[in-house]
Image (cartoon, rainbow, N blue to C red):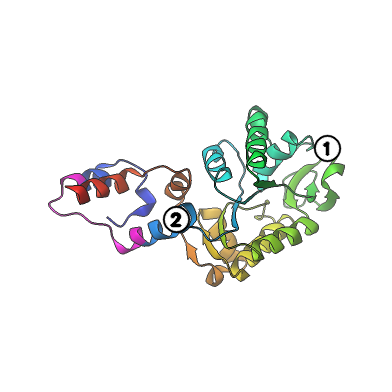
Amino acid sequence: MDAFATAHRAQASTEGALRFAPTACAGPLLAAELEAVGNIMDNPKHPLLAIIGGSKVSTKLLVLDSLSKRVDKLIVGGGIANTFLKAAGFEIGKSLCEDDLVADARRIMDEAAARGAAILLPDDVVVGPAFEASAPATVRDVKDVRSDEMILDIGPKTAARYAEIIAQSGTVVWNGPVGAFELDQFGKGTEAVAKAVAASPAYTVTGGGDSIAALEKYKCVEGVSYISTAGGAFLEILEGKLLPAVAALQDRAKA
């Protein structure tokens, strides 16, 4: 079994085959993936930093919940950060936000603070009137965002602060961009994070298609300790779940 990218699905060709094949074992890719995630979840070098970006809290709520209980610091970026900014009382204008999850964001921040961990939010942001290729980019202090603007990236002060935190970490896991890097004027924050992750002396793990695309765009692939081949499986294992294919392998090992 070497298909880590589908190990989170109980399918006949993976989990099912493992249970009925005369002999079954993990392949080298699956073993490498599990070792990399184990270095994050079970035996990380501290400080442990997670960077979770992307558009929606709803797709990564379980990951945020799980990691907020493990990490020393958690950076949230992209549309996810907007929901957390609103939970912290900031004006976010027309920015992408999941209003029904603002309370969850507040809870995650409060729980992390109670155990001495930190959820890091931007000090300054890059805004535009719309998510469009022709949209002008304006840097604003996070407290000065206007009601007719969209937050589309972190600002230069925040990017520099995050880069310093990444450099001082012992282990870094990154999933998801911190801005709309598809548009160059809103990609400087994600570029700064990608370069900082690649240059960090920490053990660094990146997973997810957008994060890998960012590493490739900014020519930072070579500097990362491990790049996962998976998206959904990578997120589920960060949630603390036992993947069906891995469970099947463990059962066969006991037989």
Residue 211 lies in magenta, yes or no? no
Q: Secondary structure at mark 2?
A: helix
* Left or right: 202 as drawn, with respect to 136: left
Let me know if residue 96 appears in the view. Answer: no
Q: Secondary structure at mark 1?
A: loop
Residue shown at 54% from the left, 63% from the top: 204
Q: Residue 164 location in percent, x, y?
A: 71, 63
Q: Amino acid at mark 2?
A: Val
Residue 148 vertical position relative to residue 153 in the rendered view, above or below: above
Residue 22 lies in magenta, yes or no? yes
User: Among all residues in the image, which is located at the extreme top?
Assistant: 100
Q: Earlier in the sequence, mark 2 or mark 1?
A: 2
Residue 26 vertical position relative to residue 255 in the rendered view, above or below: below
Q: Which residue is mark 2?
A: 37
Q: Residue 215 location in percent, x, y?
A: 58, 64
Is the residue marked by circle 2 packed among few (<14), some (14-19), or many (20+) residues within 10 Å?
some
Residues tagged 2 and 1 counted as in contact (Cβ below 8 A)? no
Let me know if residue 60 appears in the view. Answer: yes
Q: Which residue is mark 1?
A: 148
Q: Residue 88 location in percent, x, y?
A: 75, 36
User: Among all residues in the image, which is located at the extreme left?
Assistant: 22
Total number of numbered discs in the rendering: 2
User: Among all residues in the image, which is located at the extreme front?
Assistant: 115
The N terminus - image quarter: bottom left
Q: Residue 214 location in percent, x, y?
A: 59, 60
Q: Which mark is residue 88?
A: none
Span highlighted in magenta in the image: 19-31
* Left or right: 108 as drawn, with respect to 205: right
Residue shown at 44% from the left, 55% from the top: 37
* Left or right: 7 as drawn, with respect to 185: left
Q: Amino acid at mark 1?
A: Asp
